[in-house]
C-alpha cells in the first residue's frame, strides 16, 4: 500500500510485543520487595495428646472414638486465636506429631493424618505421653502450659499418676477427655466387619475408664470432660481461657508486595499508545 509506513508498523509491533510481555509478567503475579512487621501474641501453650491405640476404633460413640477425638481437637483449634498448639500421639509408645507452634492450618493438616495404624506397639502409655509433653514445652516458661489428654483410658500403664505430679511441679495443667462409653464396644481389626478376639475366641470389649481419667485430671489441676458432652469444644476453650496468658510470640516475618498492577498498567498504556499511532504516512512525522 503506497500510504503504508513500514517504520511505524515496526514501532507498533515493538509496542505490542512489550505490552504482551508485560501482560505475561502481570499474569505471573510477581512478589517483589520485603516488608518486616512485628507480631505479638498473648496466650498459652497447649499440647493435645491423642490416644491412637486400636481400642480407639471402637464405635460406641459416633462415628468412632478416633474420629470423635479428632473432631473435638479440630473444633477446638477453630476457636483458638493466639495460643500455641502441639500434637502428641500415643499407644504403646508416645510420639511428637507436631511441636508447639502457632501454625493452626499445619496442625489441622497433621491432625487429618492421625489414625490407629501409626503406632507399631499397642497399649496406652499415658505416662510416656505426659513425659514427652513435659520435654516439648518451653522450658523457660514456668507456667502458661496445658496438656489435654484424649483417651479411653484402657490398659494404661501405672506410672501416669507420678508423671502427672511431675508435670504439675513444672506448672503444667492437665485436662483429660474420656472417649467411649460404660457399655463398651467390640474392637474392629479391619474394614470387613471382623473384631478382636481373646485366646478363647471371645470378642474383646473395650470400655471407657472414666474414673482413672478423672483422677488424672484432678491430680493435674485441670478438668475432666466426657467426649459426648454437648458443646465440648466451647467448654474446653473456656477452661483454657481461664488460665493466665503471657506474651508467647514476638516474631518478625517477611511480607511480599504484589506488583502485577504495575505491569498490567504498562501493558494497557502501551496498547493504548499503539492504538493511537496511525499506520499511514503523515507529513507531521519525520519517518
Image: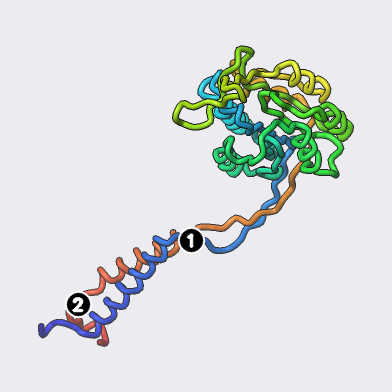
Is 266 rendered above or below residue 243? below
Say which residue appears at 54% left-offset and 58% top-offset: 257
Say which residue appears at 52% left-offset and 61% top-offset: 31
Counting from the top left corner in percent of width and height, residue 163 is at 83, 32
Is 6 rendered above or below residue 264? below
Say which residue appears at 23% left-offset and 80% top-offset: 9
> Which of pointers 1 and 2 lies earlier in the amino acid sequence?
1
Query: Which label lies toward us, 1 or 2?
Result: 1
The residue identified by callout 2 is 279
Give the quarter of the figure containing the C terminus. Answer: bottom left
Which residue sits furthest front? 200
Which residue sits furthest left? 1
Say which residue appears at 27% left-offset and 77% top-offset: 13
Asked whether the beta carbons under mark 1 and mark 2 sit within 8 Å of each other, the answer is: no
Is 213 rendered above or below residue 263? above
The residue identified by callout 1 is 259
- Examine the rendering and report whether any part of residue 68 can be seen: no
Residue nearer the viewer, 184 or 264: 184
Decide: few, some or many residues near mark 2? Use Cα within 10 Å; few <14, some 14-19, many ≥20: some
**Quick check: 219 left or right of 272?**
right
Amino acid at each position: 500500500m503506497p500510504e503504508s509506513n513500514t517504520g511505524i508498523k515496526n514501532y507498533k509491533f515493538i509496542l505490542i510485543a512489550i505490552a504482551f510481555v508485560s501482560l505475561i509478567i502481570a499474569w505471573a503475579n510477581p512478589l517483589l520487595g520485603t516488608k518486616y512487621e512485628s507480631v505479638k501474641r498473648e496466650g498459652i501453650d497447649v499440647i493435645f495428646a491423642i490416644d491412637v491405640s486400636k481400642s480407639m476404633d471402637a464405635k460406641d460413640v459416633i462415628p468412632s472414638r478416633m474420629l470423635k477425638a479428632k473432631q473435638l481437637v479440630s473444633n477446638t483449634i477453630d476457636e483458638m486465636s493466639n495460643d500455641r498448639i502441639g500434637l502428641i500421639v500415643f499407644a504403646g509408645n508416645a510420639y511428637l506429631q507436631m511441636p508447639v507452634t502457632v501454625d493452626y492450618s499445619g496442625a489441622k493438616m497433621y491432625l487429618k493424618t492421625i489414625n490407629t495404624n501409626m503406632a507399631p506397639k499397642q497399649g496406652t502409655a499415658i505416662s510416656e505421653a505426659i513425659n514427652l509433653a513435659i520435654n516439648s514445652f518451653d522450658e523457660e516458661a514456668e507456667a502458661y502450659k496445658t496438656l489435654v489428654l484424649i483417651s479411653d483410658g484402657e490398659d494404661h500403664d501405672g506410672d501416669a499418676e507420678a508423671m502427672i505430679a511431675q508435670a504439675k511441679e513444672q506448672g503444667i495443667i492437665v485436662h483429660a477427655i474420656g472417649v467411649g462409653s460404660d457399655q463398651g464396644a467390640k474392637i474392629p481389626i479391619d474394614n470387613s466387619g471382623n473384631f478382636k478376639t481373646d485366646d478363647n475366641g471371645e470378642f474383646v470389649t473395650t470400655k471407657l475408664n472414666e474414673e482413672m481419667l478423672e483422677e488424672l485430671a484432678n491430680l493435674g489441676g485441670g478438668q475432666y470432660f466426657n467426649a459426648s458432652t454437648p458443646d465440648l469444644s466451647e467448654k474446653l476453650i473456656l477452661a483454657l481461657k481461664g488460665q493466665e496468658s503471657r506474651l508467647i510470640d514476638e516474631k518478625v516475618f517477611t511480607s511480599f508486595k504484589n506488583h502485577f498492577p504495575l505491569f498490567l498498567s504498562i501493558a494497557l498504556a502501551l496498547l493504548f499508545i499503539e492504538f493511537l499511532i496511525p499506520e499511514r504516512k503523515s507529513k507531521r512525522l519525520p519517518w
